[in-house]
Amino acid sequence: MKNARRRIEVNLEELDRVLDEARQAPLSEEDHHKLREALHAMAAMLARPRNTEKTSSVVGKPEEAAGDSGKQPDINEPPSPGHGRNGAEVFSGARRVAIKHQTLTHGDRCPECKLGNVYRQKEPKVLVRVTGQAPLAATVHSLERLRCGACGQVFTAQEPEGVSEDKYDESAAAMIAQLKYGSGTPFNRLEQLEKQLGIPLPAATQWEIVEKAARPIRVAHRSSRSDHARRARHGRAACRLRRVRKRNPSRTRSRRTGPCAAKRQASGPSLHGRSQI
């Protein structure tokens, strides 16, 4: 239940008298009480009531502060130039790493004021870290081998999950093809770049990798081309037929030739009264 606001009668002339007397002598207890009640009433009227604890409601919006200054914005003034930086949401291909707080969790007591609880914010603090790397990176896996001194049997450690005996991964073939045919990077230039970064990748090897990866795609590509050509031939034939029918609307059936057609023409009209073409 809300508390009822007190009703206070304020006499401006009396307040002016109190202020004038305060210049000559200290305020009396009665005048001090009147001035205090008037100030509290004015502060209660100016205070904006709120029923939420959101930051925007407690602190206020920047637009309100700008409007109170009395300065009208110039509509002809050009907008301030941006800083030219890309936000974190633009990096769609970046690897996302979520880092939890080292000492606090959702709902813990605030270590600063010891009164309230801390809650997880909707928008975390974002740090974008861009690192340099080679277009094609290599990883050397050293598998430990153990040999029996009696029988000579050698036991080799199992390779990690996702690592096969193939030297070049499928992603390497896709990257080489993208650099060559998507970005226009020649094989020789990519070879020099990888050599400078400590990863030997000859141009001939790049061609072999791309050619091997393109074999399964070549079959599907040829099949799609043949289907497209077949549909194009049928489409052209249908277009020609429509043009012929448009020029000669009365010709709804094609002319027939051969002995059967000659026999029909010699026999005259059909039983249904239709003329033979």
Image (cartoon, rainbow, N blue to C red):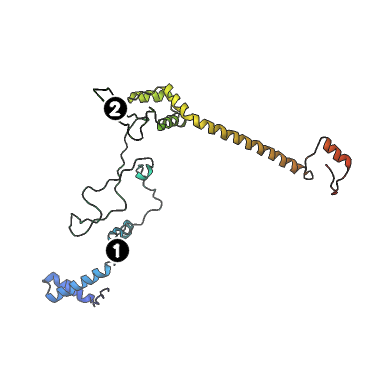
The quadrant the C terminus occupies is: top right
Task: Look at mark 2 in the image and give the residue it sits on.
Answer: 155
The answer to whether 188 appears left or right of 149 in the picture is right
Q: Quadrant of residue 140?
A: top left
Task: Please determine whether, in this image, residue 101 is positioned above or below residue 201.
Answer: below
Residue type marked 1: Thr
Q: Is residue 8 above or below residue 242?
A: below
Labels 1 & 2 near each other (Cβ < 8 A): no
The residue located at (83%, 37%) in the rendering is: 260
Disc 2: CA contacts within 10 A as few (<14), some (14-19) or many (>=20): few
Instruction: Give the label, 1 or 2, closer to the camera.
Output: 2
Point out which mark residue 52 bears: 1
Q: Measured from the top left, where is residue 40 in percent x and y?
A: 21, 70
**Where is residue 113 drawn, in percent x and y?**
18, 57
- Per the rendering, the mark at residue 21 is none
Residue 247 visible in the snapshot: yes
Residue lying at the far front of the rendered structure: 151
Residue at the image point whose x is 72% and y is 40% from the top:
241
Q: Secondary structure at mark 2?
A: strand
Using the numbered discs, state the Cα–Cα distance from disc 1 to disc 2 in whole angstroms: 68 Å
In the foreground, 242 or 158: 158
- The quarter of the picture where residue 132 lies is top left
Residue 152 % position (x, y): 27, 22
Q: Is residue 142 visible?
A: no
Amino acid type assigned to the residue bearing label 2 in the image? Phe
Q: Residue furthest left?
A: 25
Mark 1 residue element: loop
Residue drawn at (40%, 22%) of the image: 202
Packing grade of label 1 (10 A; few <14, some 14-19, many >=20) is few
